[in-house]
């Protein structure tokens, strides 16, 4: 099992989670974070750190967001999605996007 980042992170991209990850499994894209399933050790320390509740254990992913399991694995392997290990400021409009639904169309690869 692994953990995944879900739709809530799109355009919010808070990075509080990366500071606590003991294995540096987070990858950063232009407006989204993902967890590399090959690196994640299923420790769950990242879950409570996410201010928009975007991180789930794979078995707890909401049914409507199952596609994010595959998406995390796919994006984690893209060469432009680099490892992120230190917290960065959230985008200036992150709070405006925090409760927006159906954000997949805004995901930048």
Image (cartoon, grey):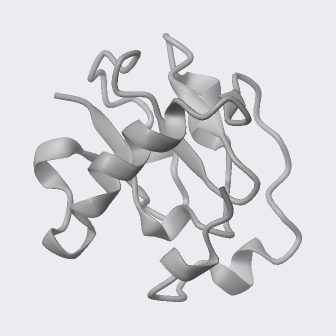
Task: Tell me: residue 67, above or below residue 43.
Answer: below
Q: Quadrant of residue 13?
A: bottom right
Q: Residue at x 56, y 38 (%)?
A: 17
Report whether 2 appears left or right of 38. Answer: left
Q: The N terminus lies in which quarter of the figure?
A: top left
Q: Nearer the viewer, residue 88 or 76?
A: 76
Q: List x then y, in percent, for residue 20.
A: 55, 24
Q: Residue at x 49, y 11 (%)?
A: 23
Report whether 36 appears left or right of 99. Answer: left
Task: Tell me: residue 77, above or below residue 97.
Answer: above
Report whether 52 appears left or right of 43. Answer: right
Q: List x then y, in percent, for residue 31.
A: 71, 60
Q: List x then y, in percent, for residue 45.
A: 39, 29
Q: List x then y, in percent, for residue 95.
A: 71, 78
User: How many marks do you count on the picture?
Assistant: 0
Q: Residue at x 44, y 28 (%)?
A: 36
Q: Residue at x 79, y 57 (%)?
A: 90
Q: The C terminus lies in which quarter of the figure?
A: bottom right
Report whether 31 appears left or right of 62. Answer: right
Q: Residue furthest top?
A: 23
């Amino acid at each position: 099992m692994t953990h995944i980042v879900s739709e809530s992170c799109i355009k919010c991209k808070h990075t509080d989670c990366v500071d606590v990850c003991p294995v540096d499994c987070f990858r950063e894209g232009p407006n989204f974070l993902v967890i590399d399933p090959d690196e994640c050790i299923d420790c769950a320390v990242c879950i409570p750190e996410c201010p928009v509740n975007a991180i789930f254990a794979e078995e707890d992913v909401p049914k409507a967001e199952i596609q994010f399991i595959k998406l995390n694995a796919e994006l984690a392997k893209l060469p432009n999605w680099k490892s992120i290990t230190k917290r960065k400021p959230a985008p200036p409009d992150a709070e405006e996007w925090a409760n927006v639904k159906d954000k997949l169309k805004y995901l930048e690869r």
